[in-house]
Image: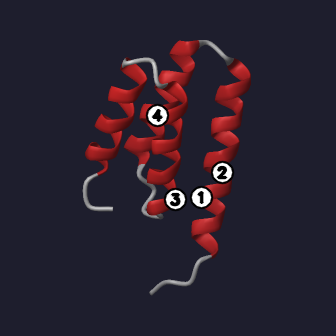
Amino acid sequence: MKNPRVWISWAEMEWGVGEKDRAREIWNVAFEASCEGEEAIWKSMLDKEIEEGDSQRVRECYEKLIIIILDCSLRPNM
């Protein structure tokens, strides 16, 4: 992924207009498109979810992040 800022801006724009499920999907696609540990992407998502105040959803985000990290670490280097 060359520019995670584009994904982040898009997701945050969707979040800002109330399209939270759409924003979550954008963050998920961005995660799956990158195995470079794009910290800025997951930090953006987690910040929004923490602001939202739903501890269960924050927990789910961390769990998803761990799965993605593990999956990426098991992929062969190309």
Residue 13 position in % (x across, y down): 32, 27
Residue type at mark 4: give it.
Ala
Comes first in the chain, label 1 or label 3: 3
Q: Nearer the viewer, mark 1 or mark 4?
A: 4
Q: Quadrant of residue 43?
A: top left
Residue at numbered disc 3: 32
Question: Mark 1 and mark 2 in contact (Cβ < 8 Å)?
Answer: yes
Q: Quadrant of residue 12?
A: top left
Residue at numbered disc 4: 23
Q: Residues within 10 Å of mark 4 (few under 14, many from 20)?
A: many
Residue type at mark 1: give it.
Ile
Q: Quadrant of residue 18?
A: top left
Image color mode: secondary structure
In the structure shown, which secondary structural element does the residue marked by tag 3 occupy? helix
Q: CA distance from mark 2 to mark 1?
A: 5 Å
Residue at numbered disc 2: 66
